[in-house]
Amino acid sequence: MDQDQRQTLRYYLHRYPHVMLPDSDAVLGYLGDLSWQGMMLITYAPLPLHIQQLFCILLPEHKLFASRQLILDAEVRWTRVYQEQDDLYCAGCRFIAPSRENLSLIDAIQTQLGFEPGFNPDRFGCAQQDTNT
């Protein structure tokens, strides 16, 4: 599967907010990039594919952020080994019907934590082999 099937512009982030499952204290990974359609996570373990679940992104305190948490329903579409560190994984997630409030918060995250649109730091070297878990 082609890794980038997004039709909206992705924003690579210069700060990586923690990502958790909503009712967990354990950090699942970090938010690596973000678009209105989905996100790429950097995780400690491969995520199960094609399962819809809620993810909680913990945001730093900032006046642009209406909330310190962004909870999004998403489906993991692909998982690959992170080339820079083979004990980490990249996971591509597609959002399921985000609310207007969530889209507004995504826009604020892109503005505050993202590089300029189209910037590609070439730091997410994800190997081509999928890990099917």
Image (cartoon, helix red, strand yellow):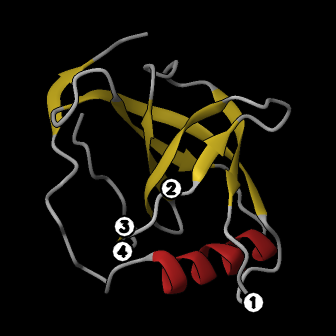
Q: Which residue is mark 2?
A: 38
Q: Nearer the viewer, mark 4 or mark 1?
A: 1
- The spot of residue 68 in percent (x, y) is 79, 66
Q: Are marks 4 and 2 in contact (CB under 8 Å)?
A: no
**Number of residues whose C-alpha sits closer than 10 Å to that of mark 4, classed few (under 14), some (14–19) or many (20 or more):** few
**Number of residues whose C-alpha sits closer than 10 Å to that of mark 2, classed few (under 14), some (14–19) or many (20 or more):** many
**Number of residues whose C-alpha sits closer than 10 Å to that of mark 3, classed few (under 14), some (14–19) or many (20 or more):** few
Is 98 situated above or below 24? Answer: below
Is 69 situated above or below 107? Answer: above
Residue 32, by quadrant, is bottom left
Q: CA distance from mark 3 to mark 2?
A: 10 Å
Amino acid on which disc 3 is placed: Gln
Q: Which residue is mark 4?
A: 9
- The spot of residue 86 in percent (x, y) is 22, 23
Q: Nearer the viewer, mark 1 or mark 2?
A: 1
Residue 61, by quadrant, is bottom right
Q: Say whether disc 3 or disc 2 marks the residue closer to the N-terminus.
A: 3
- Asked whether 125 or 7 is in front, the reply is 125
Callout 2: SS = strand
